[in-house]
Image (spheres, rainbow, N blue to C red):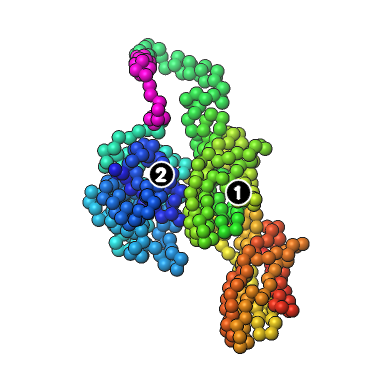
């Protein structure tokens, strides 16, 4: 029976929840952790399954990211305020049980929500001692969390380095006896060495000679210890757009592994603006270093639900002396490239959460047209530009236009009679999607149209055509 329940919101912490689930299973056992996406069976009632697992668990982990408190549904209502929100139901049920230890788990540098910002039924959560899970100290923080869980559940803990051998693999009795003798011999050696009259200076001299004879790229135990992580500065624009899926690199850091390699860690936000689920996985990323194209080592494989966002960690194993690199973000045949400088900077890895705020502010839509502008008119049907905004990505500039169709005639008219194009340099571009609505007689209707133009373009001309009439309006892109 699972003793630990992981509660999370998919568009806030799905990637971290999967990573934590795997880490806890490695230490506590495969049957000790419950997370809905992996544990529910096809056709199983979600609410019944949640209540059943809560009745069994002894520890409840409430994962809280930067979007947890203010997550909203498609109608703009805060989810925590809704009585049937599944995260709220999980927390309320866990708080009501005295035999369950409730532990808030803070990720992405999130802070504990103030008690007054929570619904009345959830407010006791604010008084619980929280645990932080930091990207650059993940193993250390998970070990602290596991210790708290084991204290409550009395579950034996298996260190990651002592994980059980693969299925079908067994050690012979002779091997076990031999291994035990080796351990005893090593212990005896160090006991005798400790009691020997050799002075400290002699020991230090021996150590210096040994280290001088060992290359810096040695794979010895001492060299394999991880070095101090450091942050990597991101480009001014660190977002790539591929149709409905937007990839935002929120932060980057490098962890020296000490064996001639380092680990590049990227915190990525996946924003799915489309209706259908999209893959948020390693296959969307490649890293070009020194002419060699590397695949990720993170094994990220999640789904970004339609009209939602989530975050995940993407890692690469890179040469320790890597300097310049190019991150490729791939979707089908489309590729966006971000230059990265992987050399050590003076900024420590703990400060990388500052990049998240910078990236989000850079993504703010900027207005480039203030008042309605008449674009084209033919007979009873006319089109005006009510608003225009641009958002710049690495690979494209998104131009979003707010249009108003006015029909002064007696009968309905179709907006599909209007042809909209953007002239960008030598290209004439069609919109990503065209309005297909019907405008009733003596009425008007508003809609939005979106174009993608090359990132080098700073000025475009919008052209509107209704039957035999054409109008143009220039727009400056910021």
- Residue placed farthest to the bottom in the image? 410
Question: Which residue is at the far left?
Answer: 98
On the image, the x and y values in percent for residue 235 come to 61, 50
| Relative side of 177 to 219, left or right | left
Which x, y percent locates residue 202?
45, 14
Q: Which residue is mark 1?
A: 329
Q: Position of residue 44 (x, y in %)?
A: 35, 53
Q: Circle 2 is placed at which residue position? A: 20
Q: What kind of element bears circle 1? A: strand
Disc 2, SS: helix
Is residue 322 left or right of 181 when viewed as pictured? right
- Asked whether residue 467 appears in the rendered view, the answer is yes
In three-dimensional space, the C-alpha distance between marks 1 and 2, rounded to whole angstroms, equals 25 Å
Q: Residue lying farthest right?
A: 426
Left or right: residue 73 compared with residue 104: right
What mark, if any, has residue 136 been given in the picture? Answer: none
Between 119 and 116, which is closer to the camera in this rendering? 119
Tell me which label, 1 or 2, sits earlier in the chain: 2
Question: Residue drawn at (59%, 80%), measured in percent from left and top?
Answer: 439
**From what the image shows, is residue 423 above or below residue 139?**
below
Q: Main secondary structure of the magenta part?
A: helix
Q: Nearer the viewer, residue 448 or 131?
A: 448
Asked if residue 86 lies in the magenta stretch, the reply is no
* Residue 243, percent from left and from top: 60, 58
Span highlighted in magenta in the image? 162-188
The answer to whether residue 186 is magenta is yes
Residue sitting farthest toward the front: 43
The residue at the point 34 percent across, 44 percent down is 33
In percent of the image, x 56 and y 30: which residue is there?
Answer: 260
Residue drawn at (36%, 58%), measured in percent from left and top?
Answer: 86
Q: Quadrant of the C terminus?
A: bottom right
């Amino acid at each position: 029976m699972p003793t630990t329940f992981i509660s999370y919101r998919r568009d806030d912490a799905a990637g971290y929840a999967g990573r934590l689930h795997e880490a806890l299973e490695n230490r506590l056992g495969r049957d000790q952790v419950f997370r809905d996406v992996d544990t529910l069976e096809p056709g199983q009632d979600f609410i019944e399954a949640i209540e059943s697992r809560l009745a069994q668990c002894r520890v409840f982990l409430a994962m809280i990211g930067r979007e947890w408190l203010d997550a909203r549904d498609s109608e703009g209502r805060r989810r925590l305020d809704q009585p049937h929100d599944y995260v709220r139901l999980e927390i309320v049920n866990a708080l009501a049980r005295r035999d369950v230890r409730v532990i808030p788990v803070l990720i992405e540098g999130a802070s504990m929500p103030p008690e007054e910002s929570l619904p009345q039924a959830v407010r006791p959560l604010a008084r619980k001692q929280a645990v932080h899970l930091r990207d650059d100290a993940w193993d250390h923080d998970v070990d602290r969390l596991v210790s708290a869980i084991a204290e409550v559940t009395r579950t034996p803990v298996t260190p990651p380095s002592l994980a059980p051998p693969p299925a079908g693999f067994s050690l012979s009795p002779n091997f076990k006896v031999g291994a035990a003798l080796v351990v005893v011999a090593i212990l005896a050696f160090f006991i005798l060495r400790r009691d020997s009259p050799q002075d400290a200076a002699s020991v230090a001299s021996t150590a210096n000679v040994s280290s001088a004879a060992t290359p810096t790229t040695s794979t010895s135990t001492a060299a394999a210890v991880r070095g101090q992580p450091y942050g990597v500065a991101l480009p001014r624009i660190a977002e790539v757009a591929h149709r409905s899926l937007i990839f935002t690199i929120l932060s980057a850091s490098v962890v020296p592994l000490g064996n001639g390699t380092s680990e590049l860690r990227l915190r990525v936000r996946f924003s799915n603006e489309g209706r259908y689920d999209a893959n948020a996985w390693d296959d969307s990323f490649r890293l070009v270093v020194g002419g060699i194209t590397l695949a990720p080592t993170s094994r990220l494989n999640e789904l970004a639900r339609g009209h939602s966002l989530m975050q995940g960690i993407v890692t690469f194993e890179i040469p320790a002396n890597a300097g310049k690199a190019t991150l490729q973000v791939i979707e089908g045949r489309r590729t966006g490239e971000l230059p990265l400088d992987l050399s050590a900077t003076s900024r420590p890895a703990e400060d990388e959460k500052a990049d998240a705020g910078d990236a989000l502010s850079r993504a703010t839509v900027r207005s480039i047209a203030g008042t309605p502008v008449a674009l084209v008119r033919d007979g009873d049907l006319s089109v005006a530009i009510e608003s225009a905004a641009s958002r710049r990505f690495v690979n494209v500039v998104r131009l979003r236009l707010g249009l108003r169709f006015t029909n002064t005639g007696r009968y309905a008219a179709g907006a599909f009679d209007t042809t909209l194009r953007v002239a960008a340099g030598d290209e004439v571009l069609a919109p990503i999607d065209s309005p297909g609505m019907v405008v009733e007689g003596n009425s008007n209707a508003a809609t939005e149209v979106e174009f993608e133009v090359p990132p080098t373009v700073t000025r475009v001309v919008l052209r509107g055509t209704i039957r035999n009439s054409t109008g143009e309006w220039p727009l400056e892109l910021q």
